[in-house]
Image (cartoon, rainbow, N blue to C red):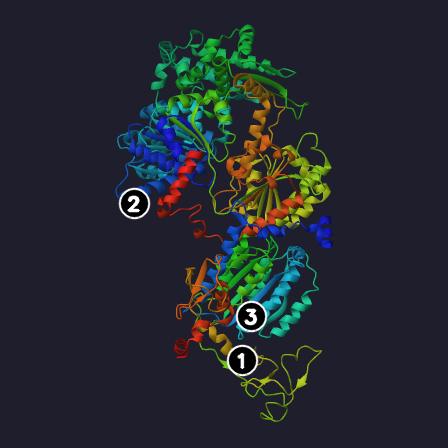
Amino acid sequence: MLELKRALDAKGHCLLEMPSGTGKTTTLLSLIVAYMKAHPHDLTKLVYCSRTVPEIEKVMEELRKLINFYEKEIGMEQNILGLALSSRKNLCIHPTVSKEREGKVVDGRCYGLTASFVRARRAADDSVPICQFYEGFDAHGKEFPLPPGVYNLDDLKEYGQMKGWCPYFLARYTITHANIVVYSYHYLLDPKIAEVVSKEISKTSVVVFDEAHNIDNVCIDSMSVKITKRLLDKCSNSIQILETTISNMKENDSKRLEKEYKRLVEGLRDASIARETDMALVNPVLPSEILEEAVPGTIRTAEHFVAFVKRVVEYIKTRLRVQHVVQESPAGFLRDIHTKVCVDRKPLRFTAERLASLIRTLEISDLTDFSPLVTVSHFATLVSTYTKGFTIIIEPFEDRAPTVPNPILYFSCLDSSIAIKPVFNRFQTVVITSGTLSPLDMYPKILDFHPVIMTSFTMTLARPCILPMIVSKGNDQVAMSSRYETREDTAVIRNYGNLLVEIAAAVPDGIVCFFTSYLYLETIVSSWYDQGIIDQLQRHKLLFIETQDAAETSLALINYIKACDNGRGAVLLSVARGKVSEGVDFDHHLGRAVLMFGIPYVYTQSRILRARLEYLRDQFQIRENDFLTFDAMRHAAQCLGRCMRGKTDYGIMVLADKRFSRADKRSKLPKWIQEHLKDTNCNLSTEECVQISKRWLRQMAQPFSREDQLGISLLTIEQLQSEEMQKKIQQRAQAV
Amino acid sequence: MADEDEVKEYRWESGYEKTWEAIKEDDDGLLESNVAELVARAKRKRAALKATGAIQLGMMRHLFVVVDASECMFLQDLKPTRFLCILKLLELFVHEFFDLNPISQLGIMITKMKRSEQITVLAGNQKKHLEALQKLKDLSCEGEPSLQNSLERAMSGLKNMPAHSSREVVVLFGSLTTCDPGDIQKTIKSLKENNIRVSIIGLAAEVRICREIAKKTGGSYNVLIDDHHLKELILNQVQPPAVAGSMEASLVKMGFPGGTISTNDGTSGSSADHAPAYCLCHIESETSSLIGNSGYNCPQCGSRYCELPVECKQCGLTLVSAPHLARSYHHLFPIKPFIERAQTPETTHCFACAKIFIEADTNVYQCETCNQIMCLDCDLFIRETLHTCPGCASDPFTAQMKTN
């Protein structure tokens, strides 16, 4: 809290590592809200970015508790408005549209009901369907702001139902004057969406990125484009649709096309005046760089533009017909496209904008068919705007199946700072926090910013509730490692198997295991099957495996939880970087132990990764190996952190690889894990590990009540104010 | 598992037990000392809990002891093996149980190979149980245990017991897994409906389902640290539990078989009472159906039993002797919990054992009535075994008060 206050005072950015379950969210919320109340002029808004919808809901619950507490203590209504925002899919209350499962379809249908031209048509012809909730909001919603309070997604829906207003647009509108906004990363990081949603947030805001250990990947993903052959084929189809629509319109209503032409001459500025609902397609590039200029003449008329897009698509198609891997810079690509099909850089830059304008003019209400074309237009705009920090890689086939031609064009962002830069520039304080951010000094480098505060916190605990151990060898003293050279070694695989069986016999309820990749998981499981290890394992616990199929995995997860609840016990084999390692918590009995088989290095043969490593080396002086280790260790820590969700929880963490005990790996673990990782537990064999776990589990099973924590990890007000405690706190603060 | 077998053979191969660490003070000042402290506090808490008077006690207990006999009971973390250690402690438990709860009944079950087996039926005769326990020593432990099956079986045995008795199950559970045929939640629910209290003692680690069962049925769940702790945990089950409240208070009809002087034949008692007759306890066991003229006759139907207490097989009357009831009597007048207070220089020694207090004894205990000071060990001894405060008993005035 102290650190956070310093950062707020300094109006700078900060980076905080706090173990999960220690009240991270509450601390952040309570201090920032208090700060907002104390300095209403310096700080007007809190933007809290989280990763998933359940996490957003959790934050809202915390906020509600906080506001209730304020009300109880102060005894008056608090003038604070907090709300959560999510996609249309989660907020829609339209009777038929909200039944759709896919986010894109909901967006498309919503657009089809609320776009300004549709509503204009409705004014002329009553049979055109529109959304009555949006109409309700448009008619009345803007005059009456949302009363102060805390609104999560369900509250918004309820309020919308009651008033007959569309909750999604209500939330979007309310963002501008709400005090606290909670939404997903993408609304801020992805320039395509940020432009629409978050434009109006003032500079004097605090932005918090929670669970931000993967923030650089999110940044990169939001700026990267992947084009496949199929996508291009679909593009051709939609171009045809465009052509026919244009010719139809020319016959019927040529005025409109003319009007559009004139508007484009005047410049793109007025595009921003366009109605909020029409913002279905947006420019992927950062705003200021493009809106200043007018659309170049070559693509102003509709037919010319369509022909232009066609040329671009055809050109990319020819490029995909390669036999070998091609890697080139955006500049090289632009030169090539210029010489081959005479496409200049400048019109290319306006492709996305122009396409959006055209679709608007043509009054196409079903947007879902056009998504491939939109992707290509984004690509064209991005490739011509940025020459640095990006690379183009064309692979004629996948590495795993070199005989099957499956050409893919990757337009990959190498520099994670591009997407996040405007965020750092715009807001006075950005807080990046997660349970696992170590090593902290890497993030400022790769995100290219200067934090004023950078701290890793540990937990104060009444009992040692995590037990990290590094198991480096099996009972037969053969070293355990997932190194490439020893991967296929049966002795190593057998040792891994024995470790799991023995742990399964000693640890109750749920055990989660993480492997380095799906491929490795499959090979290991099949050889375990041959060696009879699976049979042994199933005597103790049931076995579940994560696969790449999301539906299958969630089914496995449900049954895993069931098995743990019923006392049968279960083992879940999953993959670091997979769905399970990122989003699923295994609190209490669901994860009594986590096993990490090998170090989860990213697949180093990938060309995109190679390009990124090279770029990092050249631009930020980060050695390749450093980045790889950093990346591997943060994923390992993320996996380990899955089992620990609060002070009353406890869990064993087993790192089964010889290499973990090296100083460069060990020191990159988060501080709160390192603190419990004693030197004596760093080079264990399987049986030593099992012995230690058994004893530890018995200690942990002893009754543990609130009174036991009191004075150590829980303080009453008297204890907090006592002199001794104050001294301790002072010491801590100075030590940091 | 090949490794496992070897471990069973040779002690020294499993010998990674750093026994010295148990007594070592931890350098972090966190680990062991803290846990030891927690245990001591819990001990005291339990003692205090037991002693809070003015609650209804389920003195007439019907208790099933379920012993896990699955594969993991062959592990040697308790010496010589978990199973043998448990059986030994159970013998002690049975003895203590009948000592403290003479009008209660006990049954023993085991669970292995996903099934449960009844070893002894509910009976108030400790000899039978002890014999059965002796026999169990040769049993081989194999397969997985099934909590659900054993609880269901215990439930079917306990369901028909009279409402005024307390129905209990104590599970000694070594395994970390349970292999059940159906939804255990349903079993828990019906256990609760039938007012059956399930207490579980885990031998390895905390298993969530056990904790849940214990919590929902109002029992306790504990995991041992070592064999001393285990003994304590098992013996804790000897004390009659407080009644959950819903149990109906009723008058229980009991029979007191008279004329038990049976050794000197023919000199005492009426001839009808001591005519040679089959003893009903042994009439079913074909080997040793002894005809004798000693024993107790049911005052209602006249059936002959060689031992008390017992429930009459003919007419269902509970037969006890007066001393049995008297032994249960002290439960009704528990001594008040002693007050814990910091040790002061004035208090030099324990009143009961005359031990001189040293620095290490931070807390001493004082009786509310007679104001005498005791040490922790005496406090526990008084509470668990003596059931009377030596201070009060030696003071003629308070002793007088008590009898009045």
Please state which of the two labelled residues, at mark 1 or mark 3, is closer to the viewer. 3
Q: How many marks?
A: 3
Which image quadrant: the N terminus of chain A? top left
Per the rendering, the mark at residue A278 is: none
Quadrant in which residue A575 is drawn: top right
* SS for callout 3: helix
Which image quadrant: the C terminus of chain A? top left
Residue B153: image x %, image y %? 58, 64
Residue topped by disc 1: B320
- The subunit carrying tag 3 is B
Along the line of sight, the residue nearer the viewer: A665 or B252? A665
Decide: marks 1, 2 in contact (CB < 8 A)? no
Residue topped by disc 2: A72
- Residue drawn at x 69%, y 68% is B135
Residue A645: image x %, image y %? 49, 42
Q: Amino acid at mark 1?
A: Val
* In this rendering, position of residue B120 left or right of residue A98: right
Residue topped by disc 3: B97
How many C-alpha atoms fall within 10 Å of the one at disc 1: few (<14), some, or many (≥20)? many
Q: Amino acid at mark 3?
A: Phe
